[in-house]
Each structure stands twice: as C-alpha cells, then as structure tokens.
Image: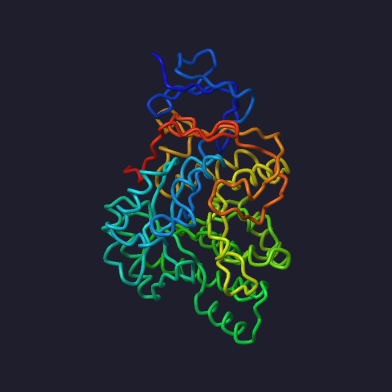
Amino acid sequence: MTVDLVVKGGYIVDSEFVYKVAIAIDEGKIVAIGSDESMPSATRTIDVHEMFVLPGIIDEHVHFREPGLEYKEDFLSGSMAAVAGGVTSVGDMPNVNPPTQDAASFKLKLQKGLEKSLVDFAIYGVVLPTNIDKIQELKEAGVIGFKIFMGETVGNLPSPDDWELIESFREIAKTGLRVGVHAENRSINAHLASQFINAGKNDPIYHLLSRPSISEAEAIQRAILFAKYSKAKLHIFHMSSAEGVDIIRMAKREGVDVTAETCPHYLLLDGEEGLRKMGSLMKMNPPVRTLDHAEALWRGLKDGTIDTIGSDHSPHSNQEKFNANIWKAIAGWPGVETLLPLMLTEVNRGRLSLNEIVRYMSEKPARVWGFYPQKGRIGIGSDGDLTVVDLKKEWIIRAENLHSKSKFTPFDGWKVKGSIEYTIIRGDVLFEQGQITPDGHKARLITPQRN
C-alpha cells in the first residue's frame, strides 16, 4: 500500500494529550496513526522534526465578502490568508450582496467558493424579517447554521423584531441546526450614538461609549430566553463583555444549549487605549472593551463558559476604514491570518496550553456546528487536515505582509512566538514554510453530519 502523504517526527496534539506518532493520509482521509516505522510507503513524506501537529484549525467566523463585495476580499484572497495562518476550514458569514437568504443566493456563494477557495468552507444563512419562510429551504440547500444580526452591522441588514426572533428560533429548531447571533441591543446603541453625533462628539472613544456592555448583555439574555422558549440551539458570536460571560455561565448551569465565541482582540487589547492611539483602525462591533472585560473572558475560556475562539475576519478598503470622524469609519479588520499566531504566543506566555488551542479552535467549532469528527480531530477516518507549528520561532506581524486585500491590523508590529510551518487540507500541502502551494487543490463545502 502506498498512501498520498505521511507526516512523521512530530508531536500530535489533541484536546487532552500530546504524543509522538506519525500520520498517514490517503484520498483525503487519515488512514493510519502510529510509530514512524509503522507507516506505509507514501508518495510524499514530511519529517516535521519535533514540531507540533494540530488538527486543522477551524475559524468559524470569517467574512470573505463574496459575492458582491470583492473589492474588500474574495474567496481566493481570504483563503490565502487562512492557509498562511494555519486555518484549514472556515465558516463564512452571510452579510454579502446579495445576502445569503435563500437557496438561490446560497448557490451563488457556493459557486464562488468552489471556484476560488483554498480552504474548506461552511456557509451560514442569514435570517431577516423577510425570509423566515426560507429557513427550511436554506437548511436543505446546505447551510451549516444561521446568523441573526440583533444589532447594527456592516451592510445594515434589518434585525427581526422580538416576535420575529421567536418565530425564527422556532423554525430553526425544527431544522436541528444552530442559530448564532450578533448580540447587541440596536435601540440602546442607536440612542447613544445619536446623542453623541448631535453633540458633535466624533472622537474615536465615542464609538466604545455608544455600545456599552449592557447592550451586549441584554441582547444575550434576550436571545437565551427566546432560545429556551423555542428549544433552539444558540451560539453567541464575538462575545466581548464580562456581563456576557456571567449570563452564559448561568445559562449553561441551567442546562440551556448555548455556546459562545470570543476573539483575540477582546482577549488581548485595551479598547480605550487602542482608540486613543489608533483611532478608527480600532473600530470593531461589538467594541473592544477595557482589560477588566478581557480578564473575565479569559476566565470564561478557562472554566468552559466560552467554547470557541474565532477571528471575525472583517476586511475593508482603506477609504472605508480610516476617517477622523469615527461615525464615518467602518468597523472591522482582517484577522484570519493572525488568529493562531496570537494564540500560540499566549501558549508561550503560559496563559493557554496547546491542548486548549485544539479545544477552542479545532474540536469545539466542529462540535458546535455539527461536523465533528469529520474535522476538528486527528483520528482514523477524519479528514486529513493538519496544522503544523513551530512553537519556538519568533517573528513580527507586519500589516503589509498580510495575504488579505486589507493591509491593516491593530496587531501591526506585535512580536509573536509561534509560527505556522505547514497547513495541510485533506492531505494536500497548501502552505509550506512561508509559501502558499495550491497545486490544483479544490475546496469543499462543509455541511452538518447526519448522525
């Protein structure tokens, strides 16, 4: 027997253990795990020389902007950034043009992804006041789950009102899929922003002040109440607040099927300081808050309240992003390429373990969205997705070197420790020691597994 690829000489990491074994991949699947000597012959063998081999990193939260907004990003540029960052699978958000709101718009996005993407991708369907009757249609088309924007977002998609939210949750519950929400109270945010704008307060700090933590906390609490009432499975995207952590923790103790994500910027940055120093570059929704909120988020990760770490990769043009008037600047920045290096740096600082990286960024995203153990695991029969990292290598994040079309990040100039050496997707080596090597690789759509 000759297989396509053998990866040997490294330490495999799962969510519990680290052990030294080799991996054989054939026809996209892992077919053998064992000692170096026990591996079959292979078309290609990679000796990773004591480096760490993780299940392929899954970024559940990206905006690759296609179709309709390709001037910001597209599946090719976004997926190039992903593989350079060690990410093998992504969940792509539906606020594109047209929004992913029915089977036709889903198929359009799917076509673009299959034509261009290097990474395997899942697609979320959006729920609007006008398409609640399309939820089952989207499920049959192949969405991984649903996204509801409870607060103002890029693209200004309308939010369902409270009864429409309940109706949506009921319909989604029938599909067996999970609904994720952007949890902010639109009326609180709009009221405060209007006050500041009318008073001529246009400095960056007022973006943070216009979106206080109570706005997120109220929206999370309301979404949980509606999910309990409708028996829907709920996910909170990009949670940013200490209050949110407390609410999720209590809901989990009560047995509510709710999961939560946070992002590196909420864990690592001080929002007040960042807005003063970087201006509109630091604008994000929900906003990056103060370090006491970051500490609460870290505690939430450690005790299992928070399930996943995603990037909220949100590329834009320079013209949209940079403006002295904070209300005229757009929110977001690219993050899929810096996601894993930033978290590996925290491993080196002792704040995370490699096992926790696998838990939050491989296993749990796959479990939350229903495609474990196809992905998120190194095991016989799982997809041959591997992220090989050198935990000792130090380097500096440079915005101009990002593979995204957007060449800006608040982490520009940060010294990080931990580099991506190989990104392998279904046995194909897509990134190798600094070089993207697509070689005819074709991405696939990720859909929920039918248990």
At 37% from the left and 51% from the top, the residue drawn is: 144
Question: Considering only vertical position in the picture, is 170 above or below 443?
Answer: below
Query: In which quadrant is the N terminus drawn?
Result: top left
Q: Nearer the viewer, residue 196 or 329?
A: 329
**Of residues 425 and 136, the one drawn nearer to the viewer in this rendering:** 425
Judge from the rendering whether residue 33 lies leftward or rightward of residue 267; answer left or right: left
Quadrant location of the C terminus?
Answer: top left
| Quadrant housing residue 15 | top right
Q: What is the basis of the colouring in this image?
A: rainbow
Position of residue 273 measured from the top left corner of the image (x, y, whole percent): 73, 65
The correct choice, above or below, for 330 with respect to 307 in the image is below
Numbered-mark total:
0
Left or right of residue 264: residue 149:
left
User: What residue appears at the point 51 percent right and 62 percent down from the top-left corner?
Assistant: 251
Question: Which image quadrant for residue 25?
Answer: top left
Tell me which residue sits at (48%, 16%) in the image: 39
Q: Position of residue 446 (x, y in %)?
A: 38, 44
As drawn, is 376 to the left or to the right of 247? left
Residue 301, relative to residue 85: is it above or below?
A: below
Q: Depth check: 111 or 262 in front?
A: 111
Residue 326 vertical placement versus 32 (above, below): below
Tell me where residue 110 appears, x and y as whole percent: 34, 49
Which residue is rendered at x = 67% and y = 38% of the image? 418
The answer to which quarter of the image holds residue 43 is top left
Q: Position of residue 92 (x, y in %)?
A: 43, 52
